[in-house]
């Protein structure tokens, strides 16, 4: 097995179970071009653990197993145990007759770096291999998932927008259920794995504030927040997204949950421009933009974007309105996001109070040893 040797003065984080090995921590490689499972050792030849190597990345290795190698190595039984452990957690915390859509594997949060598995409709799994080393194991992942009872598996790799069915094929469009709400999910053409599962509990929470209100769901994608607002008695809901296809899906999702729905409309427009020009009579505004900062170099530009949309929304929302604002940018941490929203509040000239916080749900766990995995954050505000 190939090896990666860690500098002795850089070993401590890995002894504390942090999974990312950056190139600057490496003393040497047995084969610097190796892609696959590697043994991670220190300069005294003591085994730290085993990881997936990624030589073309600054994160040259992602450790999935700490300590000595299992007696029988990393065989099918080992990977099956990891999947079953993740499934057991979801069964205890998320899965029910009202929710058949969840994240089964959340990379570092499940000690499975480089791999994400989302489940839609209970029987379809979307496997997203983030690096080549986990992509090499796709046949194993499919075999394990099939053993767990999944009938269809769709595989996406890296940043490639195109994927393929590697087991079964229920069609690209699946009906997913969460908290009894239903959504069409296009796993082939949709963003990420087809739907933003990580907002499930936040959607349910926001729905409680929408009864009798006029609601704007900005960056709506396929209308997740909109469906919950309608179900909770909103007076009117507007789904706003730059994508016409997303808006059409939002319309369909509203009708999927209520075939006679007349309170919902969608607008395909640039959210920044729409917020500036819209009427100032929305009682509830939801801002759930895509990740503005996909790397550290983009943080300053992202901060300006977050500040602009929040300031504009604060200026336009009705008095006493509820504003839910989110960031899913890993590189914009909770403290920085709060400072950005503070700056927006100051410049808006409105009185703004925090009445709640949003986080990623239980099926998107964050390892306490890997705080970088905490990416989704949000503030619930009242604007007077």
Image: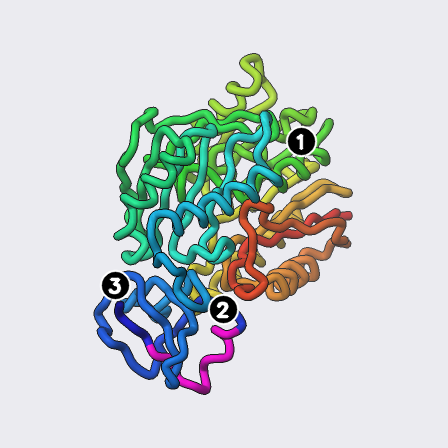
Q: Marks 3 and 1: which is nearer the front?
A: 3
- Quadrant in the picture for the N terminus: bottom left
Q: Residue at x 47, y 57 (%)?
A: 111
- Which residue does the numbered mark 1 point to in the structure image? 214
Q: Is residue 7 magenta?
A: yes
Task: State yes or no: discs 3 and 2 in contact (Cβ < 8 Å).
Answer: no
Across and down, in percent, residue 64 comes to: 42, 61
Q: Is residue 246 magenta?
A: no
- Which residue does the numbered mark 2 point to in the structure image? 18
Q: Marks 1 and 2: which is nearer the front?
A: 2
In this picture, is 112 found above or below 269?
A: below
Mark 2 lies on a secondary structure that is: loop
Across and down, in percent, residue 310 comes to: 61, 52
Q: Nearer the viewer, residue 118 or 290?
A: 118
Other residues around mark 3 within 10 Å, as few (<14) / some (14–19) / many (≥20): many
> Mark 3 and mark 1: span between their CA atoms?
53 Å
> Mark 1 and mark 2: span between their CA atoms?
45 Å
- Residue numbers of the magenta segment: 5-15
**Sequence order check: which comes first, mark 1 or mark 2?**
2
Left or right for 142, reference 253: left
Across and down, in percent, residue 368 comes to: 59, 63
In this picture, is 9 found above or below 326?
A: below
Other residues around mark 2 within 10 Å, as few (<14) / some (14–19) / many (≥20): many
In this picture, is 242 found above or below 213?
A: below
Q: Which mark is residue 384?
A: none
Q: Nearer the viewer, residue 56 or 46?
A: 46
Q: Nearer the viewer, residue 107 or 31?
A: 31
Q: How is the image coloured?
A: rainbow
Q: Which mark is residue 35?
A: 3
């Amino acid at each position: 097995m190939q090896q990666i040797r860690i500098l002795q003065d850089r070993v401590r984080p890995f002894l504390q179970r942090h999974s990312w090995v950056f190139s600057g921590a490496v003393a040497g490689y047995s084969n610097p071009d190796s892609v696959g499972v590697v043994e991670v050792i220190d300069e005294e030849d003591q085994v730290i653990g085993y990881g997936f190597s990624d030589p073309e990345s600054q994160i040259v290795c992602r450790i999935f197993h700490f300590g000595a190698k299992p007696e029988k190595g990393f065989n099918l039984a080992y990977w099956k145990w990891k999947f079953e452990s993740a499934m057991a957690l979801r069964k205890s915390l998320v899965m029910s007759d009202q929710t058949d859509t969840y994240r089964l594997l959340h990379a570092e949060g499940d000690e499975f770096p480089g791999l994400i598995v989302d489940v839609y409709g209970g029987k379809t799994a979307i496997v997203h291999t983030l690096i080549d080393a986990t992509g090499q194991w796709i046949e194993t992942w499919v075999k394990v998932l099939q053993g767990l009872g999944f009938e269809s598996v769709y595989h996406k790799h890296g940043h490639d927008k195109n994927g393929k069915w590697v087991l079964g094929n229920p069609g690209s469009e699946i009906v997913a259920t969460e908290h009894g709400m239903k959504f069409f999910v296009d796993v082939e053409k949709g963003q990420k794995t087809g739907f933003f599962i990580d907002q499930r509990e936040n959607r349910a929470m926001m729905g409680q504030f929408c009864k009798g209100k006029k609601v704007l769901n900005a960056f709506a994608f396929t209308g997740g927040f909109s469906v919950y607002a309608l179900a909770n008695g909103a007076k009117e809901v507007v789904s706003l997204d730059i994508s016409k296809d997303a808006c059409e899906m939002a319309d369909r999702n509203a009708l999927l949950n209520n075939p006679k729905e007349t309170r919902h409309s969608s607008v395909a427009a640039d959210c920044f421009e729409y917020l500036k020009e819209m009427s100032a009579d929305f009682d509830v505004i939801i801002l759930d933009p895509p990740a503005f900062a996909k790397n550290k170099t983009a943080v300053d530009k992202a901060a300006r974007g977050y500040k602009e949309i929040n300031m504009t929304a604060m200026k336009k929302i009705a008095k006493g309105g509820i504003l839910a604002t989110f960031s899913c940018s890993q590189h914009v941490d909770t403290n920085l996001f709060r400072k950005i929203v503070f700056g927006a509040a100051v410049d808006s000239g409105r009185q703004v109070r925090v009445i709640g916080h949003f986080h990623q749900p239980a099926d998107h766990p964050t390892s306490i040893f890997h705080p970088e995995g905490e990416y989704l954050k949000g503030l619930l505000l009242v604007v007077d």
